[in-house]
Amino acid sequence: MKQRVTTAGARIRSGSQAASQKAAAGVEEFPVAALLGGLAIGAVVGALLPRTRQEEDLLGSIGGSINERAKDAAAAARDAGQAKLDELGISTDAAGKQVGKLIESIAQVAESAGSAAVDAVRP
């Protein structure tokens, strides 16, 4: 049993390292796409998180001001990102395809690492 756990740990570490290397390679190959993807994911996660009662109680009217500033910051980030894409001669469609390719690669790496982990602990 101890050997099986040791082997499983080694496989998980190996899969994790491979995933990390592949993700890093994707970021190096498509840095702008990675940045835009990260911003998009952050915006989606932030939008999906519900406001809590405690947040509403603590922030009160300040919350609206913070929300407005966050929207302004997101718009500024979007505009700066679009300007950089234009400067680099990358169309929005091309950047979207790069982000899609990067996300697909990360999903494949995660699936592979997860499968290796499951296989390693199966009796």
Image (cartoon, helix red, strand yellow):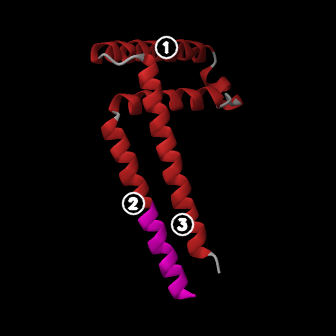
| Residue pointed to by mark 1 | 69
Residue under the point 35% across and 19% down: 90
Residue in the foreground of this view, choosing between 120 and 59: 120
Q: Is residue 107 above or below residue 61?
A: below
**Camera-side mark, 3 or 1:** 3
The region drawn magenta spans 1-15
The spot of residue 57 in percent (x, y) is: 67, 25
Give percent across and percent down for residue 119. 59, 71
Marks 2 and 3: which is nearer the front?
3
Q: Could you tell me if residue 104 is visible in this image?
A: yes
Residue 117 lies in quadrant: bottom right
Element on which disc 3 rests: helix
According to the picture, the residue beneath numbered tag 2 turns out to be: 17
Q: How many marks?
A: 3
Judging by the rendered image, the residue that carries numbered circle 3 is 116
Q: Amino acid at mark 1?
A: Arg
| Amino acid type shown at disc 2 | Gln
